[in-house]
Image (spheres, grey):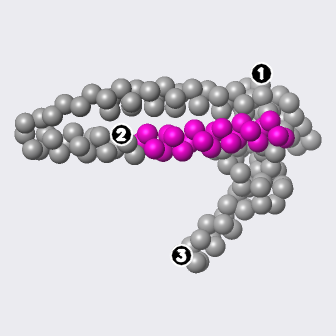
């Protein structure tokens, strides 16, 4: 298994070879396991509902519950993205921009393994969104 340093030291002609794909698959599976554990803990926290007598305490509990639900929703969305990324690895599409077909780049993939757009394509997309928003 490659280390992060070995991955970044790879030459361009080795882009998305088997070792690199295995590295990213392992990275995504670790992230998926951590999120699934977090979701399980959130389920347990949500199952325990205590009602405080003081209205201020109840408001604090409700705010904590809403924050937990938002976090759980973001984690669930990330789980879907991880599953889609694992599928792209299996299909041989991982690491290449879905808009241009160009390599996304190892540094960008290390920062955000679920990305489907290169930096340039993402920038263009965000500029269009700002322009038409």
Tell me the CA gap for discs 1 and 3. Answer: 44 Å
Looking at the image, the residue that sits furthest to the bottom is 132
Residue at point 66%, 38% (across, down): 83
Mark nearer the viewer, 1 or 3: 3
Principal secondary structure, stretch drawn in magenta: helix
Q: Position of residue 118 (x, y in %)?
A: 73, 55
* Structural crowding at the residue carrying mark 2, measured as other residues with C-alpha within 10 Å and reported as few (<14), some (14–19) or many (≥20): some
- Dot 1: element: loop
Task: Give the secondary structure at mark 2.
Answer: helix
- Please report the bounds of the magenta region as a residue range: 71-92
- Residue 133 circle label: 3
Q: Is residue 130 left or right of residue 43?
A: right
Q: Is residue 78 one of those drawn in magenta?
A: yes
Q: CA distance from mark 2 to mark 3?
A: 30 Å
Looking at the picture, how far across and down is residue 113, in whole percent? 67, 41
Q: Is residue 126 visible?
A: yes
Q: Position of residue 60 (x, y in %)?
A: 19, 42
Do callouts 1 and 3 mark residues in contact (Cβ within 8 Å)? no
Q: Secondary structure at mark 3?
A: loop
Q: Which mark is residue 29?
A: none
Vertical order, 45 against 75 (above or below): above
**Residue located beneath label 2 in the image:** 68
- Where is mark 1, residue-wise? 1
Q: Residues within 10 Å of mark 1 (few under 14, many from 20)?
A: few
> Does 102 lie within the magenta span?
no
In depth, the one of 7 and 97 nearer the eye is: 97
Count of numbered badges drawn on the protein: 3
Residue 99 spot, x, y in % from top left: 77, 60
Q: Say which label, 1 or 2, has the lower sequence index.
A: 1
Q: Residue at x 76, y 42 (%)?
A: 88
């Amino acid at each position: 298994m490659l280390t992060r340093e070995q991955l970044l030291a790879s030459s361009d002609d080795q882009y998305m070879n088997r070792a690199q794909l295995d590295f990213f698959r392992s990275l995504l599976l670790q992230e998926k396991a951590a999120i699934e554990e977090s979701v399980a803990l959130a389920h347990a926290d949500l199952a325990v509902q205590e009602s405080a007598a003081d209205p201020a305490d109840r408001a604090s509990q409700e705010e904590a519950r809403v924050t937990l639900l938002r976090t759980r929703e973001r984690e669930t969305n990330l789980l879907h993205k991880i599953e889609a990324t694992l599928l792209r690895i299996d299909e041989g599409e991982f690491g290449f921009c879905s808009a241009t077909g160009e390599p996304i780049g190892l540094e960008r993939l290390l920062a955000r393994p679920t990305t489907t757009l290169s930096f340039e394509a993402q920038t263009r997309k965000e500029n269009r969104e700002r322009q038409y928003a």
